[in-house]
Image (tube, rainbow, N blue to C red):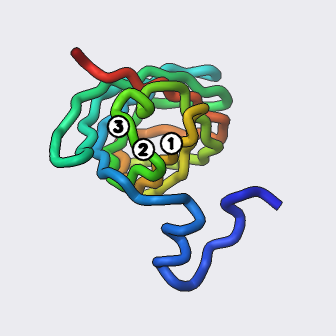
Amino acid sequence: MPAFAVVPAHAAHAADALGERTGEITFTISAADLGAGMSWGKGVLSFQGHDYNFKIRGGSGAAIGFSTMHAKGGVFNLYRTQDLEGTYWSVQGEATIGAGTGGAVMENNNGVRIKFTSRTSGARLAFSVERLTIRLKN
């Protein structure tokens, strides 16, 4: 059974399943696709009373169109700022014509998990594995 297949009825249990909520995140990603695609964007991590800017780059397959996503959510199991960096994987579907909503959980090799909800705008149809790389800005 996949680790995130079961959604507990009580919110506290959902947080426990992902680990300890240690930060907050907001980001914006634009995606352009014609078969395989590219994603790029920027965001802010709020962690231990400080804000850290980061950039996002990535790619996906099996998609066509263009969309912009605005997301916000929680960061789990982050204990050192630099552990936010890395490649995150998720499986996502998107069917945006005008506007839409969604969400996902992503995890990197450092065990950091990001759970977010999103609003999209544009015209894009996608069902693919999404690979996003986060790098902190200097």
Which residue type carries mark 3?
A: Thr
Horizontal placement of 53 versus 59: left or right?
left
Q: Residue at x 31, y 46 (%)?
A: 25
Q: Dot 3: within a 10 Å radius of its alpha carbon, few (fewer than 14), some, or many (20 or more) residues?
A: many
> Which SS class for mark 3?
strand
* Residue 67 picture location, percent across and down: 40, 36
Which mark identifies residue 78?
2
Q: Dot 2: within a 10 Å radius of its alpha carbon, few (fewer than 14), some, or many (20 or more) residues?
A: many
Which residue type carries mark 1?
A: Val
Residue at the spot of label 3: 68
Judge whether 107 appears above or below 138 on screen: below
Of labels 3 and 1, the one closer to you: 1
Judge whether 98 appears above or below 67 on screen: below
Mark 1 vs 2: CB contact within 8 A:
yes
> Residue lying farthest bottom?
9
Residue at the spot of label 1: 112
Which residue type carries mark 2?
A: Leu
**Residue 138 occupies which quadrant of the picture?**
top left
Looking at the figure, which quarter contains the N terminus?
A: bottom right
* Residue 70 picture location, percent across and down: 31, 45
> Which SS class for mark 1?
loop
Q: Dot 1: within a 10 Å radius of its alpha carbon, few (fewer than 14), some, or many (20 or more) residues?
A: many
> Which SS class for mark 2?
loop
